[in-house]
Image (cartoon, helix red, strand yellow):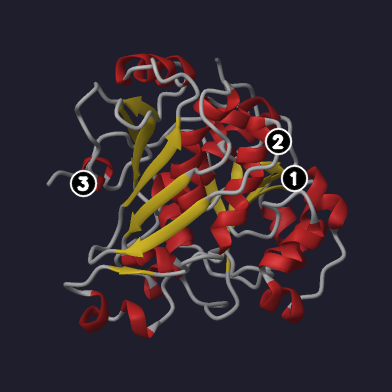
Amino acid sequence: MAPTEPARRVAVIGASGYGGLQSLRLLHDHPHLEVTFLGGERSAGKRWNAITPFLPLARDLVVRVPEPDAIAAEADLAVLSLPNGLASRLVPDLLARGVKVVDLSADYRYRSLSQWKRVYAAEAQEHPRHDDALCKEAVYGLVEWERDAIAGARLVAAPGCFPTASLLALMPFLSQGLIETSGIIIDAKTGTSGGGRAAKENLLLAEAGEAVAPYGVVGHRHTSEIEESASRAAGQPIRLQFTPHLMPMVRGLLATVYGRLRDPGLTAADCTTLLQAAYRQSPCVEVLPVGTYPSTKWVKQTNRALLSVQVDPRTSQLIVMCAIDNLVKGQAGQGVQCLNLLAGLPAGTGLPLLPFYP
């Protein structure tokens, strides 16, 4: 697809968190998108290169308070990397001024504001919201399944890291009705950067190093997000089991998804062919041969998702594995994919697919 003449000036709001930092790194060498505005409350008035010498920008912008008028004067697209609840305070005013938005938080991932308020109850108390119409309008930014809708959107809600890996594994089988809709289990492992940049006791080296620990068992916020998209794909309500684990590594995410096949005669080769067909137009997704299983190290600092599938003929159990970099394909990289589509560019433009190995 030949690029049109789209809006290519980008504002990054919340630039000093991991999501913002990754967005800036990816946009720095982008051939068509240029960062023209940096927004942040705590760093307002300071030059970017002075406060972040490890990630200097060619244009040493001054970080500014994210006022909608100022953003709209400098940018046509905005990526918001803010704590849950804060994006909803900016988005309506940005859209009213013609700025298209990719939100990396959970504020617009649900079609219903009431559902968001149930799942993010503490944030809902702190940040009262009345923008249910925007929740219904927002497009869920799982690029491989919503490409056309994203390209025509004003507001895109980038998925969470766990939902990205889990849904890339699940969607082809649910949409084709090949697995039972009950009894789905997702076992996921992630690095400590998934907890964000703010100080947390359980993410200290002395706590997380040399340790593997489950968290959010029964009721993790991403469970309902996965269920919402899975239900749409299946055409009926889905309730599944999701358990994440914190691993002693900085970045990377591996989701292993279990579901029971409706046709016990299907083989791993059959299921691999199905995955290859589902993602043949998706350059950021690679399906591995039968018997080759993905490692988080193989996708480190890339926007690539690696998928592999196996079938246990004894139990008719389907096992799908997906490895991603939680900060790139699981967050900022997918956000840039959405920016590309909003700008009329191929989704994978400017995104790395080869890892830094080892």
User: Mark 3 or mark 2, which is nearer to you?
Assistant: 2
* Mark 1 element type: loop
- Name the residue at 38% across, 28% down: 316
Amino acid type, label 2: Gln
- Expressed as whole percent of the image width and height from the top left, the position of residue 31 reads 44, 34
Instruction: Return the residue at label 3.
Output: 297
Instruction: Return the residue at label 2.
Output: 236
Q: Residue furthest front?
A: 314
Earlier in the chain: of badge 2 and badge 1, it is 1
Snapshot quadrant of residue 40: bottom right
Cβ–Cβ below 8 Å for labels 3 and 2?
Answer: no
- Expressed as whole percent of the image width and height from the top left, the position of residue 72 reads 74, 54
Q: Real-space Cα distance between discs 3 and 2?
A: 36 Å
Label 3 CA crowd tier, 10 Å (few <14, some 14–19, many 20+): some
Viewer-proximal residue among 230 and 157 = 230
Query: Viewed as shown, does residue 138 lie left or right of 331?
Result: right
- Expressed as whole percent of the image width and height from the top left, the position of residue 184 reads 49, 43
Taking the image as drawn, is residue 26 in sight? no
- Name the residue at 38% across, 20% down: 271
Instruction: Return the residue at label 1.
Output: 138
On screen, residue 319 above or below 77: above
Q: Real-space Cα distance between discs 1 and 3?
A: 33 Å
Earlier in the chain: of badge 1 and badge 3, it is 1
Please state, as top left, top right, bottom left or bottom right, where the N terminus lies in the image. Answer: top right
User: Mark 2 or mark 1, which is nearer to you?
Assistant: 2
Earlier in the chain: of badge 3 and badge 2, it is 2
- Expressed as whole percent of the image width and height from the top left, the position of residue 99 reads 74, 48
